[in-house]
Amino acid sequence: MLMILFNVIAPVLILAVIGYVWARRQLPFDTPAMTLLVTALGAPALIVETLLRVNLDLSVLLEMMLAALLTHLAFVAIGWLILKAAKQPISAFLPSLAFGNTGNMGIPLCLFAFGDHGLALSIGYFTLNSIFLFTLGSQLASGKASLTDLARTPIVYAVPVAILMIVAGIQMPVWIGNTLKLLGGVMIPLMLIALGVSLSRLKITSIRRSVGIALMRIVMGFAVGWAVAWLLGLDGAARGVVVVQSAMPVAMFNYLFAVRYNNRPEEVAGIAVVSTLMSFILLPFILMTVMDF
């Protein structure tokens, strides 16, 4: 069992460490360019190629997206109540409680834990998370509603394109499939290395608050993930993906929004760092509850 868990977690941790060491040695890494490469090309290509290749039942994909919708509604409601009771600024810290790192960490973990089927399911969850992040997350950080960030995110168009192709029974030419596979192949390693680079550049401030919110993000996510999986009657890989994706640490995009809108970026950075480090400690226990050994 321990070796199975190690096989799932080790690749994710190793690539993140590579990114961390790379940045600490002050080697060049253009984070904005890499992020654009992943979000504009790598992620959409991976989404379309995976969904068409795995031949996932459309009802299963939609069920996964429903699970993502329910978990995020719960995250927002519970997070709002917690921050309100603790008298903490909601606009600054609610995104950290509501939006997990379902891309950089969630997708590769689901791939290694549940195979290609888990990868396809995790993409459905990741897409809904991205929609919430680039609408509500951006709105909370900026204090105003805008669909600009969402409209500029190619990821949100990839799933509808794949669904339309599945429904229409369109067979993708081999050369296009191979091209998308090559493009999609850059997403996971680049995201994990970028995660390590980001961790090396962020600093922890307000330890007590960072630990509290980080722990709440993971524990709340784990509990809500299990509750939604039970509510929808999910089992096997579907249940595992919902639980794992729900329990992911704080998404790094929360920090980017905090910087863009000057909404306590130093404190959000600390929460992101602590939650990511904490997740590597808690991941074995989370995976033990959802994997078949």
Image (cartoon, grey):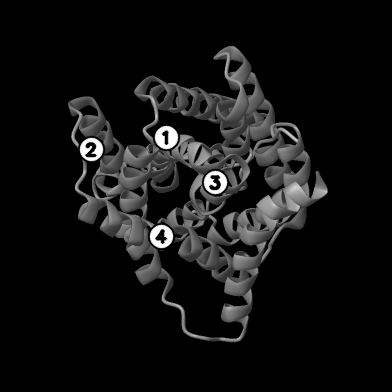
Which residue matches tag 2?
A: 161
Which residue matches tag 4?
A: 185
Say whether disc 2 or disc 4 marks the residue closer to the N-terminus.
2
Q: How far, Cα to Cα, is label 3 from label 2?
A: 22 Å
The label nearer to you, 2 versus 4, is 4
Say whether disc 3 or disc 4 marks the residue closer to the N-terminus.
3
Asked whether residue 137 appears in the rendered view, the answer is yes
Which residue matches tag 1?
A: 124
Left or right placement of residue 32 versus residue 40 in this view? right
Numbered badge on residue 111: 3
Q: Kindly identify the residue that appears in the image at 21 percent across and 31 percent down.
A: 164
Image quarter of residue 240:
top right
Asked whether residue 145 appears in the rendered view, the answer is no
Image quarter of residue 50:
top left
In terms of depth relative to the viewer, which is nearer, 154 or 114? Answer: 114
**Amino acid beneath label 1:** Gly
Q: Kindly identify the residue that appears in the image at 18 percent across and 27 percent down.
A: 168
Q: If the image is split into quadrants, where does the N terminus sit?
A: top right
Q: Is residue 289 above or below residue 274?
A: above
Q: Is residue 260 above or below residue 235?
A: below
Left or right placement of residue 165 versus residue 112 in this view? left
Instruction: Estimate the x, y position of residue 152 in percent, counting from the top left.
Output: 25, 50
Q: Secondary structure at mark 1?
A: helix
Question: Do the numbered discs 3 and 1 sit on residues whose CB atoms are within 8 Å?
Answer: no
Q: Secondary structure at mark 4?
A: loop
Instruction: Estimate the x, y position of residue 157 in percent, counting from the top left.
Output: 25, 41
**Amino acid beneath label 2:** Val
